[in-house]
Image: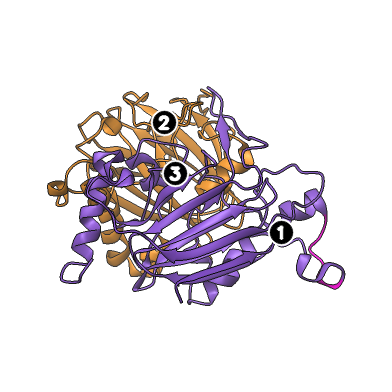
Chain colours: A purple, B orange
Amino acid sequence: MKRYQTIIPAASHWSLRVRRGTQITLTDLEGGANVGMVFYNPENLLERYNAPDTLKGQHTFKLTKGHCLYSDMGRIFASIIEDTVGWHETVNGNTHASHIEAKWGRRDYQTDRNSWMQNGHDAMLVEMAKYGLTKADITANLNLFSRVGTDTSGNMSLIEGNSTAGASITLRFEMDTLVILHTCPHPLSNAKSYPQKPISMVLEKAAPVAEDDFCKSLRPENERGFTNNALYYFGQEA
Amino acid sequence: MIKESTLNATAANQSFKIDSGDYLITKIEADKTFRIVDLEGNQAADTLFYNANDPSERYSATDTIREQGNVYLSTGSQLRSNENNVMIDLVADTCGRHDTLGGACATESNTVRYDLEKRCMHACRDSWMLAIVENPEYALSKRDISHNINFFMNVPVTEAGGLTFEDGISAPGKYVEMIAKIDIIILISNCPQLNNPCNGYNPTPIELLVWNS
């Protein structure tokens, strides 16, 4: 297979062991999407996406083109090689069932079938359990397409209209990565009704990482992260 | 918000001194009050909390800051778990604010942040690894080492989306005081980092005090 394209409906979850040297492009089909995402190393599930190391290593609170998404072992799971959104956040976690119920009512399969008001926490745990991961393995997730800003006192707010229809982000995988994602609403969403926002996904081979690669060159930290990846794969062809 | 405690340190029922670069792991029962003291100033106390009766429920930075709507911790903050339950109330704070976005230092992240050749310098996550292997009675493993609080550490976030480690805003004798709402395990690494200003490039001791009620 050269290319795989699909649509992940709203309120859904998905996972795949994504290979090194491939890329995923996610597109917000209707505007206002949120994609909760987390990474584990399939060869050692104890290595996982680390939001603090990702942020402090690149001196950033927001994530966009050029940023690398780090594991707790100093390696890069994925690089953001394209981004028309401009700001993705990684510090607000997931919705819990209690949030959904308080805002929009109880999740009800009898009435809503697969359009039920799923919450991000349960969605992620379902996918995690398929690989033997438990609630003890929960780690701070990405909320792609969602922007959370802070004021000078540190008060946070979700910025509406951050992602418009057609906006997309491309992640290039620098390691084999267990990708777990869901399309449940951002936990700070105050939409009048449960946001039903599907995304499109394209999986394809990535171009080789050039010497002057934008992500690698963004900061000296990323150069060193790429070196750590090369060491991890020492003895194997890139 | 700065708020002083009415409790007297000399009346504490337990006290633990945590030396530079060392760790502490202990249980604190529900309703007890505990205080972490920055004895010499400008020290970072990298701290994790667990539900002592089910350690897979533990402190969650994301749940905590989302529910309070603010990225910094101080008096009035409620420290929440990965199940979004309140574990601990933060009741007094003479420092002003504390970080929970910066995570802990690790030998691996030091290679990224500073230099590939800094991989062998002592780091918080190594202290935690030693803590979990030396104290098997707590049944913690690496999967339980999640995102922590950096008491006394200053990591300002800007409106433009920047985040940096800045000089500490703590000073000798400053403290943060909490009340456990459930039985908890507390795991502290007294940060040994020598590459950034989180502890003024000079790691010094901290103290944990516990009052029975």
Mark 1 belongs to chain:
A
User: In the rendering, which numbered label is found on residue B175?
Assistant: 2
Examine the rendering and report whether any part of residue B55 can be seen. Answer: no
Question: Tag 3, which chain?
Answer: B
Instruction: Kindly identify which chain the residue marked by label 2 belongs to.
Output: B
Task: Identify which residue, B130 or B142, lies in the foreground.
Answer: B142
Residue hosting label 1: A97
Side (left or right) of B184 relative to A72: right
Looking at the rendering, the stretch of residues picked out in magenta corresponds to A105-110
Q: Magenta stretch containing residue A107, yes or no?
A: yes
Q: Earlier in the sequence, mark 3 or mark 2?
A: 2
Residue type at numbered disc 1: Ala
The circle drawn on residue B114 is none
Which residue type carries mark 3?
Val
Q: Quadrant of residue A110?
A: bottom right
Against B7, residue B134 (above or below) is below
| Residue A42 appears in the rendering | yes
Write the residue at 20% across / 70% down. A237
Predominant secondary structure, magenta span: loop
Provide residue B135's location: percent of width, then percent of height.
32, 65
Q: Residue furthest right?
A: A111
Regarding mark 1 in the picture, which secondary structure is present there? helix
- Name the residue beneath numbered marker 3: B210
